Image: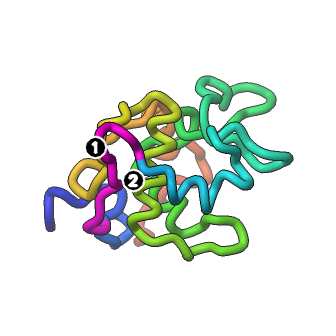
Amino acid sequence: MSENIPQSRLMMGCPAPHVIAHSTKGMIDLTAYESRCASCHGDFGEAVDNWPVLVVGEGTLGSYDPVKTTGSYWPYASIMYDYIYRAMPFGEAQSLTHDETYQIVTYLLFMDDIIDDEFEVNQGNIGTIELPYRDGFMLPDPRPDAQPIAGVT
């Protein structure tokens, strides 16, 4: 297996696509976000109407009204990529190209101050981008009803 394939993608049995998010002279390409996301999530991920906000929200998951965003919910950029690629945009799931998905992930990471505007998210580095909430997931699963049963495989 290639060491360039993010572990989370390997666990799903899918290699990371061989595409990069285009960053031209320090400017992140907003084409995909503006045409496929902004109408629901706003120009800066701030949300429109009842659609969810995509940035900020860090530290809110333990609150009464948690905000699940780039910096407050996802543990790794590769998992966020997979969700966006498979489930978005709403009503047109799985219509994004790999390139569009990388562009969207790059923009969201930039908007949440996780990367700078010259960072290119690509197959070689997406699995290494750790998001602020990466330690918020508990493994192994502590729930008593989710434990393996002895002798059952």
- Which one is nearer the viewer's eye here, 142 or 24? 24
| Residue located 54% across and 40% down the image | 70
In the figure, 35 relative to 55: above or below? Answer: below
In the rendered image, the quadrant that contains the N terminus is bottom left
Residue 34 image offset from top left, x and y in percent: 59, 54
Q: Is residue 2 magenta?
A: no
Q: Position of residue 29 (x, y in %)?
A: 43, 50
Residue with the most extreme front position: 25
Q: Which residue is mark 1?
A: 128
**Quarter of the figure with residue 17:** bottom left
Q: Which residues are magenta?
A: 17-28
**How many labels were placed on the picture?**
2
What residue does disc 2 label? 78
**Residue for point 39% across, 53% down:** 78
Which quarter of the figure is the C terminus placed in? bottom left
Report, in whole angstroms, how far the alpha carbon at label 2 lies from the one at label 1: 8 Å
Which x, y percent locates residue 15?
29, 69
Q: Nearer the viewer, residue 10 or 87?
A: 87
The residue positioned 74% from the left and 25% from the top of the image is 63
Q: Is residue 70 above or below residue 22?
A: above
Q: Position of residue 109 (x, y in %)?
A: 46, 39
Which amino acid, by three-letter code, is at mark 2?
Ser
Against 58, residue 84 (above or below) is below
Is residue 80 found left or right of 144 in the rendered image? left
First reached walking from the N terminus: tag 2 or tag 1 = 2
Please determine whether, in this image, residue 146 is positioned above or below residue 61.
Answer: below
Verify whether residue 24 appears in magenta. yes
Q: Helix, strand, or loop for circle 1? A: helix
Q: In screen coordinates, is 150 left or right of 125?
A: right
Element at label 2: helix
Q: In the image, which disc is placed on residue 142?
A: none
